[in-house]
Amino acid sequence: MYEWAHQEAFDKGKFLERYPKHGCEAQCLEYARLLANGSKHFNPKVKVETRKQNGFSSAFSDAYQRPLIVIIDHGKEISFDTILSTVMGFWNLHVEELRKR
């Protein structure tokens, strides 16, 4: 979405220049980009690992574990649902700005 909205490849540094108060969103966009490119291009150099587990979608309840986990930063884990909701929340906040371009 970033590439479509800004007509340039996603770069975390450039994103933070444009949106300096959105560090968490920048990191989530980076994880999403790595996952998408890694699966789309079957890229073995992708630096993000995932694991599956039994779980429920975030539409069901935030109290339950998620089925897709992204392993980041020395074993720290984050659910893909969290990454996706962070990215979508950011774009929902900025959609009007983008429409005016």
Image (tube, rainbow, N blue to C red):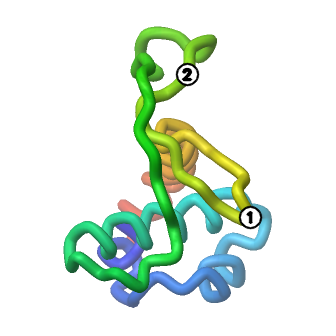
Q: Give the quadrant of residue 45.
A: bottom left
Q: Amino acid at mark 2?
A: Gln
Residue holding disc 1: 74
Residue holding disc 2: 65
Q: Give the quadrant of residue 64.
A: top right
- Quadrant in which the N terminus appears: bottom left
**Relative to residue 65, is residue 96 drawn left or right?**
left
Q: Is residue 100 visible?
A: no
Q: Give the quadrant of residue 9.
A: bottom left
The crowding category of the residue bearing disc 2, from other C-alpha atoms within 10 Å (few below 14, some 14 to 19, many at least 20), is some
Image coords of residue 25 (percent x, y) = 63, 58
The crowding category of the residue bearing disc 1, from other C-alpha atoms within 10 Å (few below 14, some 14 to 19, many at least 20), is few
Say above or below: 49 vs 38. Answer: above
Q: Nearer the viewer, residue 96 or 30?
A: 30
- Quadrant in which the C terminus appears: bottom left
**Relative to residue 53, is residue 63 drawn left or right?**
right
The kind of secondary structure element at disc 2 is loop
Q: Is residue 101 visible?
A: yes
Image coords of residue 68 (percent x, y) = 43, 39
Residue drawn 34% across the image and 86% down it: 7
The kind of secondary structure element at disc 1 is loop
Q: CA distance from mark 2 to mark 1?
A: 20 Å
Image coords of residue 51 (percent x, y) = 45, 46
Task: Name the outermost residue toward the right.
Answer: 21
